Image: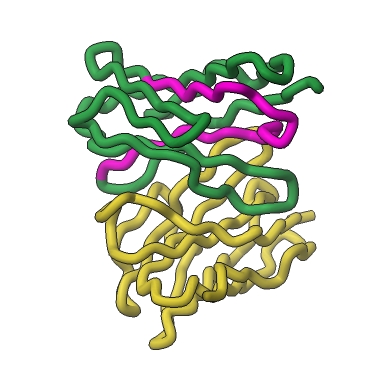
Chain colours: A yellow, B green
Amino acid sequence: ETGVTQSPTHLIKTRGQQVTLRCSSQSGHNTVSWYQQALGQGPQFIFQYYREEENGRGNFPPRFSGLQFPNYSSELNVNALELDDSALYLCASSLGPGTSGTGELFFGEGSRLTVL
Amino acid sequence: DQQVKQNSPSLSVQEGRISILNCDYTNSMFDYFLWYKKYPAEGPTFLISISSIKDKNEDGRFTVFLNKSAKHLSLHIVPSQPGDSAVYFCAASGNQFYFGTGTSLTVIP
């Protein structure tokens, strides 16, 4: 059983650029959620994907978008980067959509984005 | 608006003693509560959870208590071990998961 993997682990961008972060879900999991964790804060929900469809979204602007592929892997895209987008971006997979079941999320190690 | 709050950013405890981490929430509709542990350079890992219909759940050295009237939950670790040193996040589930800001626990050998 493979765990959640994310890439890249670290990256540096400049304001106005675009970034794509990638996530492979844990084997057997069909749901992927993305979280933003700013320094000193807890993870903040961005959105969730279930069976290739967005299934819930937090309070983030439309320049944050995503995709889920048939193999349940996922991408997070952020356009027009701002300085405040600097954060750790965490991907989490789970067995079902929403907050169903035990509620347990399996997190990757995260992608640390720095926007200069 | 922070719906889940952890008011203690850090806690230091002697090895072998009890660690008590606290969490408060505002939304009475939350139906599930979870604790996650995070080591540096790793993603959070699930530790223990409790349904809103219960007031206690125990798993080895870890016990979570839920007081719905006070909208408060706590995580007890007994006995504390140096390997427990990590950041602990409280989370609540409603239409999404809401996380607190975390408490950094240091267990002193």
In magenta stretch: residue A78: no
Closer-to-camera residue (A13/A95): A95
Residue B30 image point, x, y percent: 25, 34
Residue B67 image point, x, y percent: 29, 16
Residue A75 image point, x, y percent: 52, 74
The region drawn magenta spans B73-94
Quadrant where the C terminus of chain A sits is bottom right
Can you tell which quarter of the image residue B37 is in?
top right
How many discs appear? 0
Q: Is residue A79 left or right of residue B94?
A: right
| Direction bottom: furthest residue | A70
Closer-to-camera residue (B52/B27): B52
State the residue at coordinates (34%, 50%).
A103
Closer-to-camera residue (B62/A69): B62
State the residue at coordinates (48%, 19%).
B22
Can you tell which quarter of the image residue A69 is in?
bottom left
In magenta stretch: residue B87: yes
Residue A59 image point, x, y percent: 40, 47
State the residue at coordinates (36%, 23%).
B25
State the residue at coordinates (76%, 63%).
A10
Above or below, B27 relative to B7: below
Q: Is residue A55 left or right of residue A48?
A: left
Q: Is residue B5 left or right of residue A96?
A: right
Above or below, B1 relative to A99: above
